Amino acid sequence: MVSVTLDEPTARRLDKLRAAVRRRTGRPVSRADIVGRLIDDAYASRDETVDLFRDAQLYVADDESGTVARPQRELLAGPDERSDE
């Protein structure tokens, strides 16, 4: 298993997400389970994930409520080939 260090606000949001999953599903979920699913989703949407790192201001998080807003942006059509699969 690989260990990843999270800053305090990120760890807090991850724990709030865990609690929300537990409340809504009735089942406990680990941090690793959540991170794994998020990575699966990001990997399936690689192009959009890469775009997130092109502009540091794409996501705006509210630490109190745990909500995250992403401004809408226009996506351009491109080739369907993915050379990094």
Image: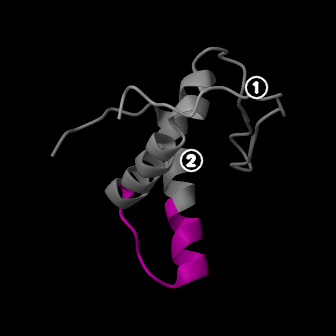
Residue that numbered label 1 is attached to:
76
Residue that numbered label 2 is attached to:
13
Q: Which residues are magenta?
A: 18-31
Is disc 2 surrounded by few (<14), some (14 to 19) or many (20+) residues within 10 Å? some
Q: Is residue 1 above or below residue 17?
A: above
Q: Quadrant of residue 32?
A: bottom left
Q: Is residue 44 above or below residue 74?
A: below
Q: Disc 1 residue type?
A: Leu
Answer whether labels 1 and 2 touch (C-beta < 8 Å): no
Rendering coords of residue 6 (x, y %): 40, 34
As drawn, which residue projects farthest toward the left?
Answer: 1
In-front residue for pair 3/50: 50
Q: Is residue 30 above or below residue 81?
A: below
Rendering coords of residue 55 (x, y %): 67, 15
Q: Which mark is residue 33?
A: none
Q: Is residue 2 left or right of residue 8?
A: left
Q: Residue at x 42, y 45 (%)?
A: 39
Rendering coords of residue 81 (x, y %): 49, 31
Is disc 1 surrounded by few (<14), some (14 to 19) or many (20+) residues within 10 Å? few
Q: Is residue 43 left or right of residue 12?
A: left
Q: Which label lies toward us, 1 or 2?
A: 1
N-terminal of the pair, mark 1 or mark 2, is: 2
> If the image is split into quadrants, where does the C terminus sit?
top left
Q: Residue at x 35, y 63 (%)?
A: 30
Q: Disc 2 residue type?
A: Arg
In-front residue for pair 65/53: 53
Q: Is residue 10 above or below residue 14?
A: above
